[in-house]
Amino acid sequence: MKKILTDSELSAFAEQLAMILHSGISTLEGVMIMRDDTPPGGGKDILDAVYQSLEETGDLSEALESTEVFPEYFVRMTEIAERSGTLEDVMTSLYEYYSRQAELMRSIRDALTYPLILLVMLFAVLVVLMTQVMPVFREVFDQLGIEMTGISAVVFRISGVVQRVSAVLLVAVVLLVLGALIALRTGKGAPALIAAVTRLPLGRRVARQLATSRFCKALALSLHSGLDMGESFELANSLTKHDEFEESVKQASRLMGEGNDLSASLRDAGIITGLNARMVTIGFRTGTAEIALDHISDNCQEEADEQIQAAVNMLEPTLTAILSILTGLILVSVMLPLLGVMTNIG
């Protein structure tokens, strides 16, 4: 399986093609110019494959898909753009989209680096406490004939377990963190992290917003192209990659089949709500539905980006709090028996 292009590479491709199309140069000639200006390497091979396919078929989306290195979203948006005659506008939109994604990935990588290092430090501190400090206190308590109970007994039992497997645990954590740092720095870990987070309960809202953003963007372009509503829904829904959202789209399609208008169907199916639903309703009344859908798409994308960034930024204080709590529990487990001894002596 070929490696999908990174967000930065996709952004650069879309930007260059948009600039070429804006100057009045044809798509085929534009790809040829991009190919000739690219130094030998993987990028030139990809552009050469795109050019050859485009020369044979005249279909850019098919040419992009044949390389197997462009994501489905990029290919399908290009397909809609070719049908609607808005290839320049869509390439500009894709440039902005993937530029924003690349910037988000960079900020996530930078934000995750310190918490991951902090995680290693946290684990190292706990291992030292459990394997070096706690056995000393355990020996003292044994000599004094103090029997451990409650939280102290639990902590000392955990200390014994950690002491036996500390080397393995420490090596495993260090390797995992190093692997995560390397993956993040090569640009592959952050998308995987987002994909994993969106499957968690707290990430489902983010996944829903991303699906709504893609759906509204594709639907706006489909409506602009003059496609019938059924085909527009099918194309737009194919880009969401969200099972629950796809069910909502099917419900909206059924509502439209029963005679409801698009804005009411989207609202009743829960695809758009509140102010967004009102914007689409007004858009249909004033003939600016495409603008309204495009605006909703941008808003959903920005909200999703902000929530992802906020979740990442919470890692550092969360890890610090965990370290403080665990260290405090260990100290309490040691201090309580000592206080008992001092009380008896007194």
Image: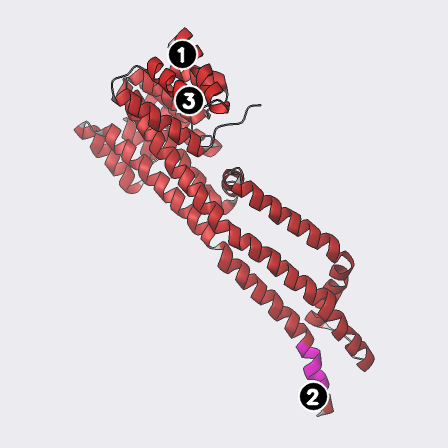
Instruction: Identify which amino acid the numbered label 2 is placed on.
Output: Thr
Whichever of callouts 3 and 2 sits on the residue coming sooner in the sequence is: 3
Mark yes or no: residue 290 visible: yes
In depth, the one of 189 and 45 nearer the eye is 45
Q: Callout 1: few (<14), some (14-19), or many (20+) C-alpha neighbours within 10 Å?
A: some
Q: Is 224 placed above or below 100 here?
A: above
Image-based side of 299 in relation to 319, left or right: left
Whichever of callouts 2 and 1 sits on the residue coming sooner in the sequence is: 1
Residue under the point 66% across and 47% down: 175
Residue 17, given in percent of the width and then of the height, sits at: 34, 23
In depth, the one of 199 and 313 nearer the eye is 313
Image-based side of 69 in relation to 175, left or right: left
Instruction: Kindly check if marks 2 and 1 are in contact, taking CB atoms under 8 A apart as contact.
Output: no
Q: Which residue is mark 3?
A: 75
- The span from disc 1 to disc 3 (Cα, nearest Å) is 13 Å
Q: Which mark is residue 343?
A: 2
Residue 192, given in percent of the width and then of the height, sits at: 53, 38
In depth, the one of 220 and 43 nearer the eye is 43
Badge 3 marks a residue whose secondary structure is helix
Residue 209, given in percent of the width and then of the height, sits at: 39, 39
Residue 235, given in percent of the width and then of the height, sits at: 39, 21
The nearer-to-camera label among 3 and 2 is 3
Is 342 included in the stretch rendered in magenta?
yes
Q: Is the stretch drawn in magenta largely helix, strand or loop?
A: helix
Is 228 included in the stretch rendered in magenta?
no
Span colored in magenta: 335-343
Q: Which mark is residue 155?
A: none
Residue 19 sits in which quadrant? Answer: top left
Whichever of callouts 1 and 3 sits on the residue coming sooner in the sequence is: 1
Q: Which residue is mark 1?
A: 54
